[in-house]
Image (tube, grey):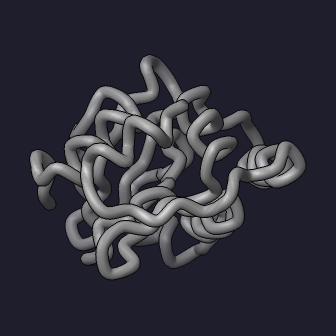
Amino acid sequence: MLVDEITNWGEATFNPPASPDALGACESRLGHVLPVQLRQLLAETNGIDGEYGLGLLWSTDRIADDNARFRDDDDFRNLYMPLAGLVFFADAGNGDQFAVLLSGDHEIYVWNHEDDSRIWVAPTVMRYLEYWMTGRLTV
């Protein structure tokens, strides 16, 4: 199980698994399937909270809600480059967001909300969690 691996990296609170219906509803709102590793992780825990309530992994509801807002809001479209190729799934606690790329190997990027940059941070969702929780990744 993916969750077993995460418990070795630091403090985290795990929510109950996302139901198949919750995963399907999230994917329906997004208009595409979730990348495999993100979907597997959500099937084990529908969100992970880190120290001080930091959203290490959002719930399926928050993933669907925030991504819909990012994609559909006119202010976002006017301020930022298109966000359609990304699925945001976590936040850094400072306004920046973590996203998985929908194409290729589903690598992880951090999106800086102030300058609209997108910087590669990890090859997979699990490596993002490891790097972030062990302090190897900072933003």
Q: Residue furthest right?
A: 21
- Depth order, front residue of 52/67: 52
Residue at 45 percent of width and 18 percent of height? 104
Q: Position of residue 92 (x, y in %)?
A: 29, 66
Q: Quadrant of residue 79?
A: bottom left
Question: Percent position (x, y) of residue 88?
Answer: 49, 54
Return the residue nearer the eye: 76 or 61: 61
Residue 1 visible here: yes
Foreground residue among 100 and 11: 11
Q: Along the horizontal axis of the image, is 26 left or right of 99?
A: right
Of 116 and 10, nearer the camera is 10
Q: Is residue 71 visible?
A: no
Q: Is residue 24 above or below residue 62?
A: above
| x and y, in percent, of residue 93 in the image | 30, 75
Q: Is residue 81 left or right of residue 44?
A: left
The image shows a total of numbered marks equal to: 0
**Residue drawn 30% across the image and 34% down it:** 127
